[in-house]
Image (cartoon, helix red, strand yellow):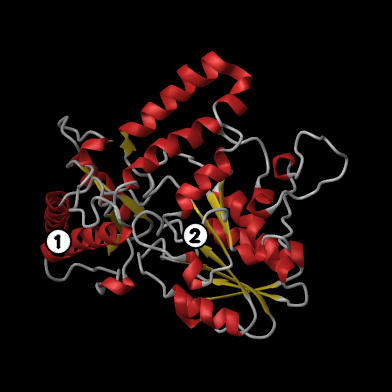
Amino acid sequence: MPSNSSPEPGFARARFVLPRAPDGSDAVYLAGNSLGAQPHAAREALLSAVDEQWARVGVAGWEACGWWATPQRLGDRVGALVGAAPGQVVVGDSTSVQLFGLLIAAARLRPDRHVLLSDAGHFPTDRYLATSVARLTGLTLRTTSPDAMAPDADTAVVAVPAVDFRTGERWDLATIVDRAHEAGAVVVADLSHAVGVMPVDLDALGVDLAVGCTYKYLNGGPGAPAFAYVATRHHEVLDPPLTGWTGHADPFGMTEAWTPAPGVGRLRVGTPPMLSMLALDGALGVFDDVDLAGVRAASLALGDAFLEALPAGTDVVTPREHERRGGHVAVRVRDADGMCAALARRGVVVDARPPDLLRFGFAAPYVTLDDARTAAGELAALLWSAS
């Protein structure tokens, strides 16, 4: 059992470097749903990789420093945060690359079907890739809201996020997966706005394939590598489209034909980006001694404090019910970009989704209740002055 199963908001604040406000103090940093703050351990791991490993060991680091095994070793660390038993998650490449591979691999699991069903409000890369995958595979792309998805006998793939990237609404993955499986479809879940801020139990939910980024609530740094999950039941039949050399069963055999590595290792594509991966390895230490249910409770408490401090009439688009809320709260304003900049001048860092949404992210490891209330107060002052 983790030693700190019920952490308070801001429980690991001392383990982070926070961006500076204009007055030189720590900013109220509520943009962790876009890019997490920097953990000291990520910097230390990166410096060690550069100075102690690459500089001193050189090419021998692939074995001597364990670099070659890192995508799957790190995959198991991330897998523990999304309810995946060991051997089902691999880290490497970007979210877009991982998602492209999983969508086509999912379609190949159902070659006799013709429909790719996706969230109409999916994050842009998910929508763009779904469109491209449909063109490449001959599938018909159909879109709707996740809570309205009704897969049928011709649905090959259901692609859905765990949390809406704009509004912060949390979707009912359990029901979506059940409906998809009743129809015989394969589910590809995007966990980018869920991993690290709430428990996700992929194995128990029966999700087939999943992808997620690591630079938001996992604090892996800008451009940190993404992860892919493949349920064990699909391992030996999964047919990925990106057949790179590191996903070969014998990568250094340099054979003419590609033979897939066993299990999730076949999703490896190119040479792993080791500096980014080792920074992420350091960042994940924040979660080693805490229970994600406690992290979730702390994040919800932050959101509640923010919502309670907002003035009446504020246009909050995120559901207030805990079971329907993700890790961020979105507020509709007239000029999202302008309001975002004005908040930054007051020491409150959030992000905007034009034309009219501000997103306030509640990353429990470093955000405090005072931060949440301060952000609400500064927003209220700006809304009042603009009225």
- Residue 335 visible (yes or no): no
Who's the residue at 65% across and 48% down the image? 265
Residue bearing the label numbered 2: 84
- Using residue 136 as the reference point, say whether residue 273 is left or right of it: left
The answer to which of 124 and 185 lies nearer the viewer is 185
Q: Secondary structure at mark 2?
A: loop
The location of residue 52, given as percent across then percent down, is 47, 18
Q: CA gap, disc 1 to disc 2?
A: 32 Å
Question: What's under tag 2, amino acid-wise?
Answer: Ala
- Which residue is situated farthest in the front direction here? 1
Q: Residues within 10 Å of mark 1 (few under 14, many from 20)?
A: some
Cβ atoms under marks 1 and 2 closer than 8 Å: no
Residue 305, numbered circle: 1
Q: Earlier in the sequence, mark 1 or mark 2?
A: 2
The answer to which of 329 and 218 lies nearer the viewer is 218
The answer to which of 320 and 258 lies nearer the viewer is 258
State the quadrant of the N terminus.
bottom left
- Residue 53 visible (yes or no): yes
Residue 287 vertical position relative to residue 151 in the rendered view, above or below = above
Residue 107, numbered circle: none
The location of residue 180, given as percent across then percent down, is 57, 79
Who's the residue at 34% across and 61% down the image? 198
Residue 30 vertical position relative to residue 273 in the rendered view, above or below = below
Who's the residue at 36% across and 50% down the image? 217
Question: What's under tag 1, amino acid-wise?
Answer: Ala
Quarter where residue 105 is shown: bottom right
State the quadrant of the C terminus.
bottom left
Q: Secondary structure at mark 1?
A: helix
The location of residue 214, given as percent across then percent down, is 45, 47
